[in-house]
Image (tube, helix red, strand yellow):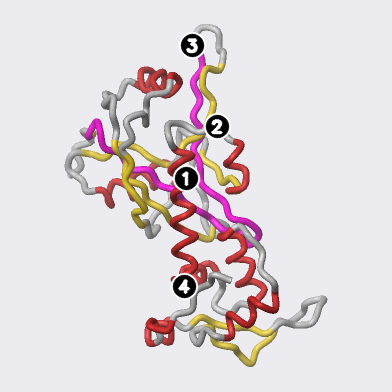
């Protein structure tokens, strides 16, 4: 049974990336603090989905609990991408003001373990409680104010995701069972933040034996129907040693 007694110097932060078939997004939590007397906004920025762990739970359980508590998202595969313990993680004036305001007994120095996930955010509904949580295009993060070192954590997670998507077939989990090459290209362009030449991309895909062409095409489209493909996990596992990188 969870004791709900926090570990004051250990937290987890979840960087949840979502693809909506047009762009890559990230899930952020709004942080706002107003002066109780004047109503003046003292702090207004965003954080990742994170909090401290409890004394009687492990890191993975804490990450799942925190994510569900803030967003309602459940059964999301989370993967660690790093641990962060810089001396100045919580040393800025606004962050000290925030920690003093919430009075949760956190330590002056906090080590956090980062988790990331990649999901189809069109298939999930956020269950909002007492915090404003929303999806933001990753391209907008550079101009946003973020708490603590969360912008650094975000970019570290993005780099980890981009490395992973180049050598593992995680992007296929965002696609329907049958997909077109254009849909596949759009996923990789969104995650990697770049654009590929269509002809070169098709040549690269043709080398991947686990991307299976089907005798099936689009129907009811105003343009030339595109051929459908499917991803074969079985073929992928059999040909792991001959995997092709998506570095194009």
Q: Secondary structure at mark 1?
A: helix
Range of residues picked out in magenta = 7-36
User: Label 1, label 2: how many angstroms apart (C-alpha)?
Assistant: 12 Å
Q: Earlier in the sequence, mark 1 or mark 2?
A: 2
Secondary structure mainly formed by the magenta segment: strand
Q: Earlier in the sequence, mark 3 or mark 2?
A: 3
Observer-nearest of 111 and 53: 111
Q: Position of residue 88 (x, y in %)?
A: 36, 29
Report the residue at 66% width, 59% height from top. Answer: 22
- The residue labelled by disc 2 is 145
User: Label 4, label 2: how many angstroms apart (C-alpha)?
Assistant: 33 Å
- The residue labelled by disc 3 is 36
Within 10 Å of disc 3 (Cα), the crowding (few <14, some 14-19, many 20+) is: few
- The residue labelled by disc 1 is 154
Report the residue at 42% width, 84% height from top. Answer: 242
Report the residue at 55% width, 12% height from top. Answer: 39
Q: Are marks 4 and 3 in contact (CB under 8 Å)?
A: no
Considering the image in quadrants, where does the N terminus appear? Answer: top left
User: Label 3, label 2: how many angstroms apart (C-alpha)?
Assistant: 22 Å
Within 10 Å of disc 2 (Cα), the crowding (few <14, some 14-19, many 20+) is: some
Observer-nearest of 245 and 235: 245
Observer-nearest of 22 and 153: 153
- The residue labelled by disc 4 is 169
User: Label 1, label 3: how many angstroms apart (C-alpha)?
Assistant: 31 Å
Q: Earlier in the sequence, mark 4 or mark 1?
A: 1
Question: Is residue 138 depicted above or below 90 in this figure?
Answer: below
Q: Position of residue 149 (x, y in %)?
A: 43, 35
Closest to the camera, between mark 3 and mark 2, is 2
Closest to the camera, between mark 4 and mark 3, is 4
The magenta stretch spans residue 133: no
Q: Earlier in the sequence, mark 4 or mark 3?
A: 3
Within 10 Å of disc 1 (Cα), the crowding (few <14, some 14-19, many 20+) is: many
């Amino acid at each position: 049974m969870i004791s709900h007694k926090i570990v004051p110097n250990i937290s987890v932060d979840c960087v949840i990336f979502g693809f909506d078939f047009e762009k890559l997004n990230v899930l952020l939590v709004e942080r706002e603090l107003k002066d109780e007397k004047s109503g003046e906004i003292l702090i207004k920025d965003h954080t990742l989905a994170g909090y401290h762990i409890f004394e009687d739970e492990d890191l993975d359980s804490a990450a799942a609990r925190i994510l569900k508590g803030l967003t309602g998202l459940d059964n999301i595969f989370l993967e660690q991408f790093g641990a962060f313990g810089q001396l100045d993680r919580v040393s800025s004036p606004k962050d000290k003001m925030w920690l003093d305001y919430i009075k949760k007994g956190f330590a002056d120095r906090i080590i956090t373990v980062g988790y990331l996930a990649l999901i189809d955010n069109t298939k999930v509904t956020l269950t909002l409680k007492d915090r404003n949580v929303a999806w933001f295009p990753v391209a907008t993060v550079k101009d946003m104010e973020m708490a603590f070192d969360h912008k650094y954590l975000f970019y570290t997670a993005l780099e980890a995701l981009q490395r992973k998507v180049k050598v593992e077939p995680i992007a296929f989990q965002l696609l329907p069972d049958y997909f077109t090459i254009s849909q596949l290209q759009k996923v990789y362009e969104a995650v990697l933040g770049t654009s590929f030449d269509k002809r070169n991309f098709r040549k690269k895909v043709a080398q991947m034996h686990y991307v299976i062409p089907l005798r099936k095409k689009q129907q009811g489209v105003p343009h030339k129907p595109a051929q459908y493909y499917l991803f074969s996990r079985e073929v992928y596992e059999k040909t792991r040693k001959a995997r092709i990188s998506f570095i194009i």
